[in-house]
Each structure stands twice: as structure tokens, then as C-alpha cells.
């Protein structure tokens, strides 16, 4: 299961169709990142670069030139090197870039300083995302200045630079059928991992042991890496939004919040489940949990074509504020409490974000100052939460230290929505039943 060569080609054609005539787009690959001394982190391709060609190697540069006579898609990449491949693995080389990835022309990356200025020369506009890499920014300007230095002999430098991000990221925002299949697979693997963690949880385990359960299930499903550092927060750590130490021993009577998702074929899942370490919610825990669950369901029901981006978030505010008021954690009229943002003491983040090749995916949330309308193919997370700090002396002791977040991945469909991660149980009765079965 992967994105096909024809789909990558369609993506490039769509982007070139948005570019001005006689222009050029330049997109570098990601770079390998040093982890310590002579070891690197596992390489992960730049999302924009991957979206346009799927070429999986570092030290590469993708060039698009609409209506170029000798081919519109040019790729610079590493040459084949038998000695380096013996140590570090296969390289496609320029030949493989053409045969395997659809490049019209491919050149050794070592020749880019000699070849790319000639491709830029005479083009009126350069599309490039300035500011991501200071080193590559400097190289782009050096190539342009090299052309400028030859103006007296007839060289024509580009007249304009245009940021590529807006056009390209708008294309990435709406997913194709093939992308949704990959995201469904990522969601299924992630849901299975959350179920495994629920079955295996018990007092005395360390948070990192549940993280290990998640990572094991990811890899078993074909997703070697998480999409982001996993959050496994038990007890008071469930109230820390981006807690990643995962080093505490879990105790009976506490909740554990797991925010973790796999990356499958570069596409992310992002799922949060909160459940009781001992397998049974206490009455205060269940009361808070049900408010969050009701808020999430209200937000999911607000996802359909034509509704705007902020509608799901607004739905969570109304449910959470009313629920906290009914429990006595807030006092006042619901509308006034929302206007005063009184909920922010317990619910301090938005209800979701775009999801795709990046876990916080690209795409504007507002267009011309208005919330963007939802369209079929967009994918977003829905993740309301309530977090009552363990040292919050303004609330009764029974509420302190309860942190609950429930998060799912939702695609906008032509008729409404589809939850990609439904296989991970959300209702407390279902969670308790799964945990009881796992413990038996």
C-alpha cells in the first residue's frame, strides 16, 4: 500500500498549473540529523519533497520547470556508490531517479552548482520556501548572484522570488483516496496499539512500559516509527499537556493518558485515550471523562462540508463549560463563562488541528480573515480535554489531579465525516470491559 507514480505525477502537474509561466520551483530534501558523535537519527524525508515525488533519500533537490522542452521534473541526487551502499544501504542514483520515481532528468547532486544556475537563468520567477534552511537559502542566493554577475554578457537573472508554501500546502490539505487509505491504515495500527496498552496496564508498571507496548504494536503493523514523541502520563502527569518523560510508576486508582500515534508511509495518526490504571473509573474520574466524551462527540457531529473550521471547537467549549458548571467547578451562566474564557483554567488548548504528512499538518485555518470552510478530503483531529491541576486548591480534593483527553482522527466526507480511529474504544464501559478481558 503506497502512493503510485501516476499520483505523484498528478501532484506535480497540479502545482505547476498554479505556477506563473516561465518559472521554476526548487524543493530540497530533508537532511540527515546528527544524534550523537557519529550516529544519526533515522532519516525522515521532508514532507513537501515527499508529497511531490516520494524519493526517500537525503542530499536531493527537486526542480519543477513548467513547459521545459527536455522535461519538467528534474531531480538531483546522490550517485550510486558500491562502497557506501555496502555500509549504509541502496541508493537509487540518477538512473533510478528516472526509472523508479518518474524524473524526466536526473543529475548527481555533486554537479548541482554547475547545472542549477543554468536552469534558473532566464526564468522570471523562482518558487522557493525561504527560511527553512539557512544553508540552502545561502546556496539559492549564491546561484542567483552567479547569474547576476554575468548580466553584462547577456545572462538574465530571475526577477521575483515567491514563497512556495501557500500553493503547495493548499494542495496537501485535501487528501486523495490513496492518502486516505494510508491514513486509515495508520489509524487502525494506532487503535490496536491503544487497545494493547489498555489490556496490559496495571499498577506498578512504569509509563515507559506502556509506551513500549505502543511502539511494539506500531512496528508489528508495519509502522516502524511514531509520528511524534509518545505521551504516557499517569496520575498528576495526565495534567501536563506535552509530558514526554514517561518515567513514573503508575499507581492504582489513577488515570493514565496516552497520546500516541504511528507514522505509516509518512502519514501520521494522532490518538489520545485516557483510562484507569486499575481498570475501573472512580466516580469523579467518570464524571470528568463523560464531559470530555460528550464534548468530543459534539465536535465530531459539527464536522461536515460547508461548516467552518472553528465550529467543532466552539461545540467543545459549550459542552465543557456547561459540564464544569454543573459539577460546581465553574459558577455562573454558561454564555458569560464562555465569553470570559473561564474554561481556560481547565481546558487551555484548541479542539484539534489538520493531520496528514505532518502530525500538525499544513494548511491555513483562516482565509481572508474568515474561518476556512470544511471540504471533503480534509482530515483533522478532535481532541478536547479537561485538566485539573493536582495543586488546584480552588476545587474539592476529589477532583484534583484528574486529566482527561480523548482524541480521534476525522476525515470530512461528501456526506459528513468518518472517524478513522474508531477501533480504539472511547466509552468508559467499553474501556472497562476491554481492560477486564485483558486482565483475565
Image (cartoon, grey):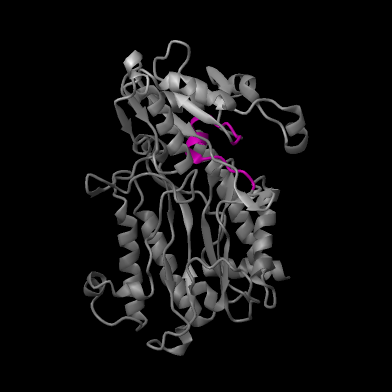
Say which residue appears at 38% left-offset and 74% top-offset.
Answer: 346
Q: Nearer the viewer, residue 364 or 300?
A: 364
Placement of 40 over or under 198, stated as above or below? above
Q: Is residue 194 visible?
A: yes
User: Which quarter of the rendered picture does the N terminus lie within?
Assistant: top right
Residue 135 in the image, given as x and y percentages of width and height: 48, 40
Total labels: the figure holds 0
Say which residue appears at 54% left-offset and 64% top-offset.
Answer: 273
Residue 51 shown left or right of residue 156 in the figure:
right
| Residue 80, image quadrant | top right
Residue 211 shown left or right of residue 153 in the figure:
right
Q: Which residues are magenta?
A: 42-58
User: Which quarter of the rendered picture does the C terminus lie within?
Assistant: bottom right
Placement of 234 over or under 270, stated as above or below? below
Placement of 240 over or under 19, stated as above or below? below
Q: Nearer the viewer, residue 242 or 200?
A: 242
Residue 96 in the image, given as x and y percentages of width and height: 64, 22
Say which residue appears at 52% left-offset and 40% top-offset.
Answer: 46
Q: Is residue 10 visible?
A: no
Q: Nearer the viewer, residue 34 or 11?
A: 34
Is 45 included in the stretch rendered in magenta?
yes
| Residue 261, image quadrant | bottom right
Is 123 included in the stretch rendered in magenta?
no
Residue 191 in the image, given as x and y percentages of width and height: 59, 55
Residue 380 in the image, given as x and y percentages of width and height: 42, 50
Residue furthest to the top in view is 69
Placement of 84 over or under 306, stated as above or below? above
Residue 303 shown left or right of residue 11 in the figure:
left
Residue 338 shown left or right of residue 186 in the figure:
left
Amino acid at each position: 500500500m503506497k502512493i503510485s507514480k501516476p499520483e505523484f505525477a498528478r501532484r506535480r502537474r497540479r502545482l505547476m498549473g498554479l505556477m506563473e509561466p516561465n518559472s521554476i520551483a526548487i524543493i530540497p530534501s530533508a537532511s540527515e540529523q546528527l544524534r550523537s558523535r557519529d550516529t544519526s537519527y533515522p532519516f525522515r524525508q521532508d514532507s513537501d519533497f515527499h508529497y511531490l515525488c516520494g524519493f526517500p533519500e537525503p542530499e536531493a533537490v527537486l526542480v519543477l520547470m513548467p513547459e521545459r522542452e527536455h522535461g519538467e521534473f528534474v531531480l538531483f541526487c546522490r550517485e550510486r556508490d558500491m562502497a557506501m551502499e555496502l555500509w549504509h544501504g541502496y541508493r537509487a542514483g540518477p538512473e533510478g531517479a528516472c526509472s523508479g520515481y518518474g524524473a524526466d532528468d536526473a543529475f548527481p547532486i555533486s554537479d548541482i552548482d554547475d547545472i542549477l544556475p543554468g536552469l534558473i537563468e532566464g526564468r522570471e520567477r523562482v518558487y522557493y520556501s525561504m527560511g527553512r534552511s539557512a544553508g540552502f537559502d545561502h546556496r539559492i542566493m549564491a546561484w542567483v548572484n552567479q547569474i547576476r554577475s554575468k548580466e553584462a554578457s547577456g545572462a538574465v537573472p530571475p526577477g521575483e522570488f515567491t514563497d512556495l508554501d501557500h500553493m503547495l500546502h493548499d494542495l496537501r490539505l485535501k487528501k486523495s483516496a490513496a492518502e486516505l487509505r494510508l491514513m486509515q491504515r495508520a489509524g487502525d495500527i494506532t487503535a490496536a496499539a491503544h487497545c494493547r496498552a489498555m489490556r496490559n496496564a496495571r499498577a506498578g508498571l512504569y509509563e515507559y512500559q506502556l509506551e513500549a507496548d505502543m511502539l511494539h504494536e506500531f512496528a508489528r503493523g508495519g509502522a516502524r516509527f511514531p509520528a511524534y514523541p509518545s505521551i504516557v502520563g499517569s496520575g498528576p502527569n495526565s495534567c501536563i499537556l506535552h509530558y514526554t518523560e514517561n518515567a513514573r510508576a503508575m499507581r492504582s486508582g489513577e488515570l493514565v493518558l496516552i497520546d500516541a500515534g504511528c507514522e505509516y508511509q509518512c502519514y501520521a495518526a494522532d490518538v489520545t485515550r485516557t483510562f484507569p490504571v486499575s481498570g475501573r473509573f472512580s466516580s469523579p474520574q467518570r464524571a470528568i471523562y463523560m464531559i470530555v466524551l460528550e464534548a468530543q462527540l459534539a465536535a465530531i457531529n459539527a464536522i461536515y462540508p460547508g461548516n467552518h473550521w472553528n465550529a467543532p471547537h466552539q461545540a467543545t467549549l459549550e459542552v465543557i463549560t456547561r459540564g464544569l458548571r454543573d459539577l460546581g467547578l465553574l459558577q455562573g451562566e454558561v454564555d458569560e463563562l464562555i465569553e470570559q474564557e473561564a474554561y481556560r483554567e481547565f481546558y487551555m488548548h484548541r479542539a484539534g488541528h489538520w493531520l496528514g504528512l505532518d502530525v500538525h499538518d499544513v494548511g491555513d485555518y483562516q482565509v481572508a480573515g474568515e474561518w476556512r470552510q470544511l471540504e471533503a478530503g480534509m482530515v483533522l483531529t478532535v481532541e478536547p480535554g479537561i485538566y485539573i491541576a493536582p495543586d488546584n486548591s480552588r476545587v474539592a480534593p476529589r477532583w484534583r489531579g484528574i486529566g482527561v483527553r480523548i482524541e480521534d482522527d476525522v476525515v470530512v466526507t461528501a456526506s459528513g465525516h468518518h472517524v478513522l480511529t474508531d477501533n480504539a474504544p472511547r466509552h468508559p464501559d467499553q474501556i472497562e470491559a476491554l481492560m477486564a478481558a485483558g486482565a483475565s
